[in-house]
Image (spheres, grey):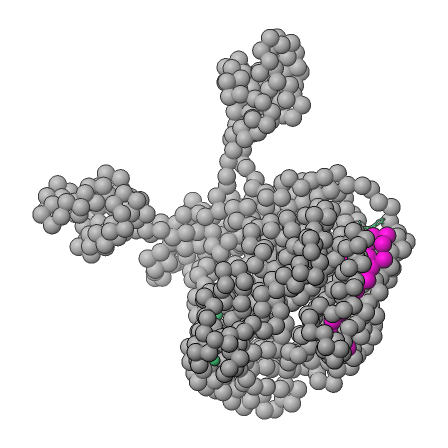
Amino acid sequence: MQRIAQVLVNIPTKSINKAFSYIIPVHLDFIDIGWRVIVPFGNRKLEGFIIGVTDEEDVSHFDLKPILDRLDDTVWFDDHMMQTARWISEYYVCNLVDAMRLFIPGKSGVKSVTTYRIADHVVIESMIASLLKKSSEYSQVLMYIHKHQPVMIGKLEKEFGPGALKIVNYLARKQVIIGEAVAKKTAMHRYKNVVRLSVTQEVGASLLESFTRKPAQCRLLTYLLAHRELPYDDFAQHNISYDAVKKLVQAGVVSIAKVQSIRDSYADICAPGVQVSLTADQQQVLGAIIPTMQAREYHSFLLHGITGSGKTQVYIEAVAVARANQRQAIVLVPEIALTSQIVARFKARFCDDVVVMHSKLSTGERYDAWQRLRTKQAGIVIGARSAVFSPLPDLGIIIMDEEHEFTYKQEEAPRYHTRQVALTRARLAGGIVIMGSATPSVETYYQALQSEHTLLTMAKRIAGALLPEVTVVDMREELRQKRRSVISLPLLELLAETLERKEQAIILLNRRGYATFVMCRECGHIIRCQHCDISLVYHAVGNLLRCHYCQTVEKTPDICPKCSSRYIRFFGTGTQKLEENLAKSFPGIRIVRMDQDTTGGKMAYDRILDAFAKGEHDVLLGTQMVAKGHDVKNVTAVGIIAADSILNLPDFRAAERVFALLTQAAGRAGRGDKAGKVVVQTYNPEHYAVQAGANHDYTAFYQAEIGFRKELCYPPYGQILKLTTQADEEGKARSQADKIIKKLKSMLQHNDTIEVIGPFPAPIAKIKDVFRMNIVIKAVNIIEVKSYLVDMGLTTRPDVIIDVDPISIM
Ligand code: ADP
Ligand code: ZN
Ligand code: ZN
């Protein structure tokens, strides 16, 4: 009997969509489905995931290689993770290995590197002698390999410079040396040294007296009696010297140990919180949630609570109940910009039981965080969408804050939606899901009305705080009054009042940069990116033009590249220019800008928000990230500039986006005991999304929107699947799309509930020199379509993107 493993090799090649068989060697007999292993693949050694194991009588007639090693000490993919991955691969029609990769830290747990050694037949002395005739460098490289073998190329390059590669290739070609692949595990544990008592507490205490004349040793002993251990890194902080440690080691009182060091960049934010007594609304909502948790059965809730109604507190209480039952929790937030306040509140309540995860963590930090959750050292993970894949042995609750946010949809393969994954995982684990929002997505709200989720409502702000008063300013009217500034008169007045009262304001403008585009007034030429079909954006800093899609940077020309005229002008307003305008209108105003240009580093969002919350700035100005999630009591004014520009996009979710953005941005104002005011500048004052947003009226918005969705059979009434063809020439992308459409239409002839629309060029037809054509498939039930896509071989084609339930159809 021989155990054979079916292994998916972790490589991002879309066309390889099958498992390979490997022998499980005797020394690895304990490994099974779900283990991560290292396998030989071609001439490399790669990470693989075991997805099946069989027993074979006789394998001598197969040419099978053995698994080389395991990556972890335990199984990585538990049963629920495997099932979730399979579900993702079926629902989103992607390769299983791509779905499984979502569950590991980093892209791969293995790095394949080549090492070199001298070939067996080579007589080294004579070889060196003959190489010496060619060049001394060649013989030196060979000598080095002989002495240090096996040697990695990096080592040789360090020793001999970049020319080493050429020499190594030559020697390998002549079969003097042999290159062999080895696998290096990437996410290794990190260790740190700590000092510990090596005697019992009582003995330690009794010894204390005998050290009174040696203050340094006394300090260390006193510390260890109180805290058990002290990391080397903290010596300075506690005024401990290595010498004192050495003396106590010699005396046999303390010892030095190596322990696994857990990397945690949020380790410092743990402040004790204040206990709050829950409001009637919060109690009623929790009264519905908690009994379902005791039952250990799947249940989903939509918590529709207006901004500032105390949803976060509900999340905390629900998680506390889960923890009291020894079950683990995932808390999802839409983007890292929003994590800092919610993290602070969870840390205040749960301290070290919380781990924070987001895509900007290093692979090592992520690995450590997962290790703590897997081993139940921690019970709560907070993070952006990837946190939904955390390895929790006993998942009891998933919170999804701001469930309507589009960032929950991954825009690269696999194109999953976090909500769907969360519901699937909770169902498998017998846990609950709480989706919270002030502006629930139309689909989720519809499902709640259909009783797919339990709808819970909180309609009042905490402590009687009022929703802000909203003024809608018609910008066409402003223009008729000969006011051309981007800041309308009502907004100027509101800002003046606010600054006067020493309160703070937030201004939202959905465009970064100084001006949105650069145009020649003579010939109308607009300066565009050479690689993307989009205009470049002027940035005053450095006088540069930037492409916001491919990061190309160019110097701003003095004359028009087309007609050589000098009349190059900047049009539109970006955040940088707005900042300048405000500074002119309000001398001495302290403005902080938050957009992608100012938030490069890992913690930059947090720093900006923190400084703003402390009152170090009067105005927070930025793109949509200023609109969300945070709670600053002194903000009483919000200005929204051109939020409705989205309405001009040909997309069925445009109205939903505008409504959510207006409501969320307005929701930042008046969260304390001071009333708030909001000015919305728009060119579409009569649009239902703007009207309902200004009136804080979700129901009015929902009713208008759902009617429109029904009429056109958009979600939730129909499902959408978007296909995109990509090619380096426009014609190729189009002809591929045409072929697919023709085939699909003939296959779907019999079915009039499926509609194929297109092809049409993507709104930005070219990005990074790749042309893109879209096909939209609308269906009452999309399952049939998916099976056709598989039959047509589209799922493994690298030039075709399949997006199930796309966020936008553009
Ligand atoms: P939401 O998440 O719905 O926007 P939050 O949970 O952030 O609302 O609550 C808004 C504010 O009210 C926060 O400052 C929070 O600390 C406070 N708060 C929440 N619940 C209570 C309560 N029961 N008693 C007093 N203050 C509360
Ligand atoms: Zn570009
Ligand atoms: Zn010109």
Q: Which residues are magenta?
A: 668-685
Quadrant for residue 65, please give it. Answer: bottom left
In the rendered view, does 456 fall on the left or right side of 580? right
Secondary structure that dominates the magenta span = loop
Residue 243 visible in the current orientation? yes
Q: Is residue 321 above or below residue 403?
A: above
> Which residue sits at x=41%, y=47%?
184
Residue 79 visible in the current orientation? no
Q: Is residue 380 a member of the stretch shown in magenta?
A: no
Residue 517, horizontal then vertical, whole percent = 55, 73
Quadrant for residue 259, please give it. Answer: top right
Which quadrant holds the N terminus?
bottom left
> Which residue sits at x=64%, y=78%?
649
> Which residue sits at x=64%, y=57%?
593
Q: Is residue 100 above or below residue 156?
A: below
Quadrant for residue 11, please give it. Answer: bottom left
Residue 349, horizontal then vertical, whole percent = 75, 43
Residue 442, horizontal then vertical, whole percent = 74, 72
